[in-house]
Amino acid sequence: MTKSVEVLLAEVVDRWRASGPLADLIEIIDEVWRTNLDRHEPSELGDDATSLGVQCSRNIMNRCVQHIGNRADGVIVRGGATLELSFAGHMMHVSKVQTQGRSWHPNSIDWNASGVRLEGARENAAAYTATSGTLFDELTGTSLLGSVGDPAHLKHLHLAWQGLADGEIRVFVGFPTTGAVPWSAVTLVHDSALMRTDLPAITDASRSMSSHDALIEPSLSLRRRVQPIEADAAADGSA
């Protein structure tokens, strides 16, 4: 029996965390964000959101190349224009979320900002596309088990991390795709404010395509937001 895309994502995340590079990657992101946020100097050095984003992106990439690839069996890490990690048949790219607001939802991400991200999303869409609740499903008049293709053929992962003004981070991992929503499935894998990493999937993309109002919001505790360092809409410099 074919596994659902949500079940598959949960298994892949567990594998990447238990014997792959995910735990080390999250630790590096957390350390880099806290360090760079602490030394961020808009008034004295002229830092802004772009310089902060670029600094974090380069620091994370260089540290991953130096440390993760040499410590985890079967992990391949490539740097350059973008950070690429390969493990257990899947390839992951990494990007920083531009906004520091906790109301940000992963379905607002845009793959068109990067050719690398867009290509991964297109390859995934060619391998598997959810159809439940979409126009395609209505036109065919058949359930097609809610999808075209087998989610086991999804090879591209994306990790989107969000640095918050209080030094905390949130990390999302999913299968990028093209269409009404940018993920076949996505889950919150880390929230340093909650101090736990076993959070459930927050997005069932196949069910959320029919209406924006139906999108499932993350089940997170909210607290007063610290004034962001720069405008949220500023570019972050990630590849």
Image (spheres, rainbow, N blue to C red):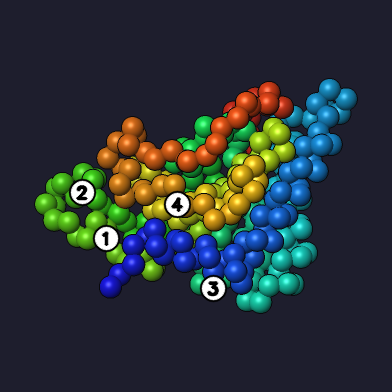
3 and 1 marks in contact (CB < 8 Å):
no
1 and 4 marks in contact (CB < 8 Å):
no
Circle nearer the N terminus (1, 2): 2
- Marks 3 and 1, how far apart in space? 24 Å
Residue 44 horizontal side relative to residue 180, left or right: right
Circle nearer the N terminus (3, 2): 3
Q: Quadrant of residue 130?
A: bottom left
Identify which residue, 191 or 124, lies in the foreground.
Answer: 191
- Marks 3 and 2, how far apart in space? 32 Å
Residue designated by label 1:
148
3 and 2 marks in contact (CB < 8 Å):
no
Residue designated by label 4:
201
Circle nearer the N terminus (4, 3): 3
The image shows residue 43, relative to residue 16, as above or below, that is: above
Residue designated by label 2:
136
Position in image of residue 143 (x %, y %): 17, 56
- Numbered disc in front, either 3 or 2: 3
- Marks 1 and 2, how far apart in space? 10 Å
Q: Residue at x 39, y 40 (%)?
A: 216
Q: In the image as oriented, which residue stretches furthest toward the right? A: 44
Q: Amino acid at mark 3?
A: Ala
The image shows residue 238, relative to residue 229, as above or below, that is: below
1 and 2 marks in contact (CB < 8 Å):
yes
- Marks 1 and 4, how far apart in space? 22 Å
Residue designated by label 3:
88
Q: Amino acid at mark 2?
A: Phe
Dot label at residue 207:
none
Q: Secondary structure at mark 1?
A: strand
The image shows residue 142, relative to residue 19, as above or below, that is: above
Identify which residue, 199 or 91, lies in the foreground.
Answer: 199
